[in-house]
Image (tube, rainbow, N blue to C red):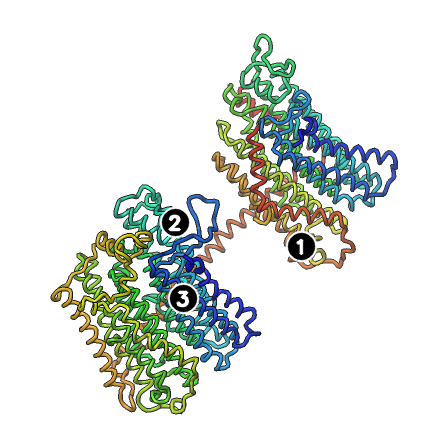
Amino acid sequence: MAAFTYAPAIVLLPFVSFLVALFAGDRMPKGGALAGITATGGSLLLSIWVALTVAGGSVHNEILYQWTTSVESLQLNFGLLLDPLSALMLLIVCLISFLVHIFSLGYMNDEGETGLPRYYAGLGLFTASMLGFVVANNLLMAFMFFELVGLCSYLLIGFWFREDGPPSAAKKAFLVTRFGDYFFLIGVVGIFATFGTGLFAPITEGGEVVAESFPMLAEHAIVDGEVEGIAMLETVGMGPQAWFTVLGLLVLGGVIGKSAQFPLHTWLPDAMEGPTPVSALIHAATMVAAGVYLVARMYGFYAISPTALAVIALVGGFTALFAATMGLVKQEIKQVLAYSTISQYGYMMLALGSGGYIAAVFHLTTHAVFKALLFLGAGSVIIAMHHNENMWDMGGLKDRMPVTYWTFLAGSLALAGIVPFAGFWSKDEVLYEALIHGFGTEGGLGTAYLAAYAMGLLAVFFTGFYTFRMVYLTFHGDARSDTARDPEPVHWNVKGPLTVLGILATTIGFINMAPVAKLTGAHIDFLHKWLTGPEEGGWPALLSTDLHHYEELLHEVPHVDPAYPLGGEIGTLLASAAVSLGLALAGVLVARSLYGGADPVEHTDKLGGLKTLLMHNYYQDEYQVWLATGVTHPLARAMDKFDQGVVDGVVNGVSSVSLFGGSRIRRIQSGVVSNYATLLTLGLVLLLAAFGIMGGWF
Amino acid sequence: MVALPDWMALAPALSLGLASLVLLLADSIDPDTTNTGAIAGISVVGSLVSFGFAGWFISAGTGIADSTGVALFNNQLVVDQMALFFMAIVASVTTLVVLASYDYVAEHSYQAEFFALVLLSATGMSLLSAANSLASAFVALELVSLPSYALVAFLKENKGSVEAGLKYFLIGAVSSAVLAYGISLVYAATGVLRFDGIATAISSGTVQTIVNGSIQAQAGDPAVPMAILGVGILMIIGGVAFKTAAVPFHFWAPEAYEGAPAPISAFLSSASKAAGFVLAFRVFAVAFPIGDLLATGGAINWVMAFQILAIATMFIGNFAAATQETVKRMLAYSSVGHAGYVLIGLAAVSSSGEGLSLSMSAGMSHLMVYGFMNTGAFLFIALAEYWGVGRTFEDYNGLAKEAPIACAAMTVFLFSLAGLPIGGGFFSKFYLFSATLEVGAWSLAAALIINSALSLFYYSRVVKAMWIEEPNGSQTIESYPMGLYTAVVGAAIVTVLLLPGFGRVYDVAFQAAQLL
């Protein structure tokens, strides 16, 4: 397929723009922005082409470059895996990156920032790395690009490195995510050691599997009991189920760090120190999605482990609620959005954990659109407010910046989950899947699902509340500061991306209106079909990354099954949708009643002690700092003592013994040649005597 | 392909010998010549031609097809891949040495003799590579030794040089006596001198004789007296140990290397050592097959003897090197230590005699790499002597500021000698290490690791002095001798290139070892 031949260019184009911006950016107009726009635009077009080709039923899984050649049992490759999931993700990343590049013209260039080549180089490298991560066909390549996006995130958060906040936030983001990636790395090594391959999907040639994937090998081991080839199981002395769970949880460490899930979510709010377009691209729409995408990418591996599924669902549900509560009291617009991002990724994890593969991918898609929109809208507001982010200094911006207001409102409605905006459809599906699988699955897993569902459901109310608290404080009422009364106007390069995303945020939910499809029987659940593939043959038979396969696995191994407790399928569906919509509306209405007036006042004091707790983010940062200074540092000091005293002591001892021995040996060399002849002869005689006695010559 | 006459197989040795004769001729025409360029040129051409022939024959696969090599003079000499491999080592070291000597001897008289002696000795090494009987081996060995005694004492005005030459000669005489006695005992025990004949005698257990070039049992089937054979073998080990500067026959080495002109130290410590090892490899792999020796009641387990020697040599060489104050003497001891590493080639053999070709090929490859890195290091010393830089580590302080290229080359040599992956020395040590693991020779593996770590310490001292320390005097370097520089830089480039090219060298070595 021609589209697949050119697919590597999707990754390479932004990389070229990175090089151009880095080395020639200061000699180009707009500091390299145009190169980035051209490159991401080109990547977007190629991604559309790839997506169309994939829609035509063909997929691509090929090794491009093998960089270990000598070891037979272990092959490390770079390769492309283009299936419906990666094609969809390519579209999302390219689109958002393209729009963010345009928006940056308004946010960075027009604001007279310096260091633009560095900025656009960072964006280019990030886009290239993210796209490389998306198309990776094996775990090691994915890991490498996963680290690269982390590096770009670090560089871009710390873009304003001369101020105090950004460098520190960048370091925090880097360290916290690295903590998770540490487990990820062990997981990668473990998976390679166990299966000898990191392929996500089998590579086939003419119908024959030439290279098996690790999720399939794991599946064969558990479903068909084919464990002979896996020597690692004996080494660790565990059953396949237990060991694969360990491996899955290790990889999950990286996911939790990158997708800012509890307890490694603390870096994301600080990451808002970076430029707002960066927050939109990296810390909302794409990089943070990398973790969730990774779980979806190797879903076949998680689907066979009930423990891992339960952990994912519970972490997701808890994070969704936990982050939403912290978002309630924030005063800065980007902080609210940051906590909302954490919360929304919690929903995706909840969906993945509770067997809602489609729901997770769907929410990933809609969230990428409406959260990028909200961040860019916030960026527009920040431009207007001369970089004052405090919502209590805003108010009344509705009439002065209508495009921003209306698009922001569309994004907020989507985030809050109000019908028919995008977020409603996806969030509803997430909760619905958790609910039916919670009732249908026996044992602890089902209970875990129901608990996670309850937390997710409660978070819907908070989401509606903090979202519209933000909208009312920012745009409604009277202006509360001079800048808000006379905001700086924004240009087409800000309004254009906002409009595109605003329209998408309103409409993109229509790609998978599952409830409507169920009710009317019309086949309009396009995303569902996109990820399921044809019934017989086709790409699912080649790659086994289709929904149908995952559902079978979920049914067979952890026994995740749906059940409809409330009047059959339709009844449950309607009830679930009604409850979540009702809660969201309730949240909106409460926000309206509290902050909807012309001159809203703070109500946080009414929370009492809870306010302090929430303002301090449950003391998460404090306890993590304590872990570092109170536990790790003394431990490190003790290790250092050991290293200095015992290890160095041994080394020094060995060296002084060596030197002493050396000086003794030197003395043999007396310089008198007759001594040498004597020693030589003696040595020979000694050898003769020894071997003579041994050989029985005498 | 033109079929060359058989005697042409000796072309690598012959071209060296011819070049030395041309030099002697030139010397007799113009005894007091100072035309160093012409003389060094003849030597370089001779050794390059030798290298060319060796390389050509290796790549043409001489001796692979019939797996016996080209037998000459009633099987007294045999040219096979092993012989050619070592001829290549000898020729390349000789090339570097004569190239570097161009500057070194420019000030001295008797230049033609100097080069003629180097080439005669190299001819002996080349012949030794091909020796297939104890008699021809002994003759070739003496051809190696006698010129080298004279070469060590070449600086007649220098007391150190003369003293070193005399000591070298005396120890050499003792060792030659031991070797000759060992040969006579082996002959007495087996009735033959040809390596394959000795092997037949050992495996059949009866004394052999050679009639019209074919080996047959002596009339009456007298049995081989194993005790006499054992003593003979052990004494041959002694003779080999002398040439390779292995413990306890190493005493001459530090003094000779230190006293000799630095290019000669390079020549002796690289080429002469390699020549000693080719004799050892061929004698012990062909003439004294360990499997048969152990099966027929066991005159001697020479593998164990080599294990003892290897470990002792590694430890004594490296530990003594660690405490030296002068760089040249440090290198001399490290050269002893490296003999220990290469001895692993004969020591890492399982009790049933397996693993010999693996370990031997690792040893051969190490010698090939060593031929460049060690020669290069000694030639750097020659360069320092040429500049009048002192002998101790401190005298090298800040040298890199004056001569960065030469110091970079020296750094490559030293780190490669230590086994860091900057030159081929990394892989050759690694293969030696894996050869020890292959047969489970833990003591050898441990000795290799410990001594490599120790060697990194004393090699780094030179690197530290050159690059990190501040110069303590205000000495300036006035000239940059072309021949020495070419040799040093060339050796450095080859050392680095042997890192990616090591696989090729090892393949040749492994094939050569297997053909035995």
Assess disc 2: are there few (<14), some (14-19) or many (≥20) residues with their C-alpha within 10 Å of its C-alpha: many
Q: Is residue B140 above or below residue A625?
A: above
Is the N terminus of chain A in the top left, top right, bottom left or bottom right quadrant? bottom left
| SS for callout 1 | helix
Q: Is residue A631 above or below residue B172?
A: below
User: Comparing marks 2 and 3, which lies closer to the viewer?
Assistant: 2
| SS for callout 2 | loop
Q: Quadrant of residue B167?
A: top right
Residue type of the residue flagged with mark 3: Thr
From this viewpoint, which residue is outermost toward the top? B220
**Left/right of residue A311 with respect to residue A141 in the rendered view:** left
- The answer to which of A509 and A386 lies nearer the viewer is A509
From this viewpoint, which residue is outermost toward the left? A567
Residue type of the residue flagged with mark 2: Thr
Which percent across, then down, holds residue A165?
44, 75
Residue matched to label 3: A629
Is the C terminus of chain A in the top left, top right, bottom left or bottom right quadrant? top right
Q: Residue A197 shows which numbered tag? A: 2
State how many labels appear. Answer: 3
Q: Output the chain of dot 1.
A: B
Q: Earlier in the sequence, mark 2 or mark 3?
A: 2
Callouts 1 and 2 close, C-beta under 8 Å: no
Residue matched to label 1: B466
